[in-house]
Image (cartoon, rainbow, N blue to C red):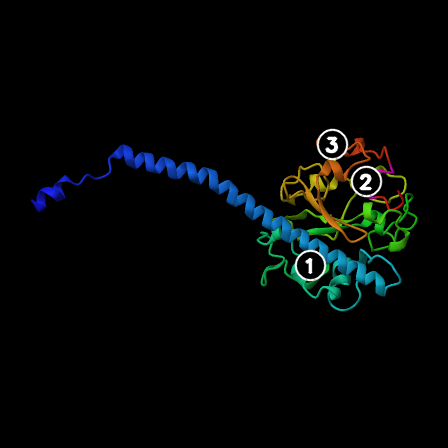
């Protein structure tokens, strides 16, 4: 009798197994994107927190240096670390280099943060940081005719915080693309360029700067993908970037909103991006 009971137990049929597998696959297809979005949201929040800490450090720095914005680049200061960029100037007010490391770039392939890598040296990561850039054309302004250009610094002298007309509506920094290739080396930078900086009458920049499909930031080997139309401003987060403002607040912006007051739209060349409403342009310190 016992053997008959054992023999009467039914195993799963092939159809039943396939149904179970199909249900699991459907649940996975639903849940995995949710998990990925949650992970992305966490990185976005971490990035925004990093940006906030950097901005507060920059404001504290100005309090000790006659209200001046940090200088984008100070040529070799003789301490063995090469040039000093603004990221290193404000770092003592943060005391944490990891806050200059974007969550997106934690596993960058070029090893700027990896001991033993040929690109791991103080003048790289302790000078530039990784993943954030200042609105240098206007905050270290050399004037529309570049008459204020400082040799070896890349831009002009720092301006005063109190000289900014609308601090809550003027960009201090954004997420930045990083440049590099295994063949030619690796480097980054501590600045981002404004959408219409090249053709602005009150900012000094090089000829292929700014935004646009043929701009510096879209034509070099940037990572992540370079063809965003936003120059060297990175759009990691749902096609947008975290932005800090001169008054100290931070928020997420899409490229269209960040380029308001200009003719920018994705896909057009640099030469077609012009300022058409300076009162709405978020990069100019005197709007």
Question: Which residue is at a point 77% across and 38% down the rendered structure image?
Answer: 259
Residue 129 falls in which quadrant of the image?
bottom right
Dot 1 and dot 2 residues touching (CB under 8 Å): no
Where is residue 170 drawn, in percent x and y?
82, 46
Q: Residues within 10 Å of mark 1 (few under 14, many from 20)?
A: many
Camera-near label (3 vs 2) is 3
Location of the N terminus (image quadrant): top left
Residue at disc 1, secondary structure: helix
Residue 8 lies left or right of residue 149; in this view the side is left
Residues 1 and 82: in front is 1
> Tag 2's secondary structure?
loop
Instruction: Let me know if residue 127 appears in the view.
Output: yes
Sequence-wise, the earlier of marks 3 and 1 is 1
For the C terminus, give its image quadrant: top right
In the displayed structure image, the side of residue 148 where residue 273 appears, left or right: left
Spatial CA distance of label 3 from label 1 is 33 Å
Residue 194, x across and y down, in percent: 79, 42
Q: Position of residue 134 (x, y in %)?
A: 77, 51
Residue drawn at (53%, 44%) of the image: 36
Q: Residue at x 60, y 47 (%)?
A: 41
The dot on residue 124 is 1
Q: Nearer the viewer, residue 143 or 219?
A: 143
Instruction: Tell me if mark 2 has few (under 14), some (14-19) or many (20+) residues whose alpha carbon lies within 10 angstroms of its own.
Output: few
The answer for how far apart the CA atoms under marks 3 and 2 are is 19 Å
Q: Which residue is mark 3?
A: 265
Question: Which segment did they paint magenta?
Answer: 278-283
Residue 207's label in the rendered image is: 2
Q: Residue furthest front?
A: 1
Q: Nearer the viewer, residue 163 or 147?
A: 163
Mark 1 vs 2, N-terminal side: 1
């Amino acid at each position: 009798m016992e053997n008959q009971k054992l023999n009467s137990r039914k195993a799963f049929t092939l159809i039943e197994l396939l149904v179970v597998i199909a249900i699991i696959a459907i649940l996975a297809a639903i849940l995995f994107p949710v998990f990925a979005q949650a992970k992305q949201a966490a990185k976005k929040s971490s990035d925004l927190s990093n940006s906030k800490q950097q901005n507060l450090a920059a404001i504290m720095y100005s309090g000790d240096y006659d209200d001046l914005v940090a200088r984008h680049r100070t040529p070799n200061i003789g301490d063995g670390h090469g040039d000093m960029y603004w990221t290193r100037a404000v770092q003592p007010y943060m005391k944490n280099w990891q806050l200059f490391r974007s969550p997106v770039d934690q596993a960058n392939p070029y090893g700027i943060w990896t001991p033993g890598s040929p690109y791991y040296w103080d003048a790289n990561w302790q000078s530039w940081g990784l993943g954030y850039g200042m609105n240098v054309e206007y905050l270290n302004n050399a004037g529309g005719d570049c008459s204020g250009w400082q040799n070896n610094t890349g831009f002009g002298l720092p301006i005063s915080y109190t000289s900014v007309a609308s601090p809550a509506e003027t960009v201090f920094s954004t997420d930045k693309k990083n440049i590099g290739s295994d063949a030619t080396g690796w480097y980054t930078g501590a600045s981002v360029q404004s959408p219409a900086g090249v053709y602005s009458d009150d900012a000094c920049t090089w000829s292929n700067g700014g935004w646009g499909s043929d701009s510096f930031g879209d034509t070099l080997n940037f990572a992540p993908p370079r063809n965003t139309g936003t120059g060297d401003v990175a759009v990691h987060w749902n096609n947008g970037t975290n932005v800090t403002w001169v008054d100290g607040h931070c928020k997420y912006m899409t490229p269209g909103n960040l380029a308001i007051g200009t003719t920018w739209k994705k896909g057009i060349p640099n030469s077609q991006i012009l300022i058409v409403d300076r009162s709405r342009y978020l990069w100019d310190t005197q709007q």
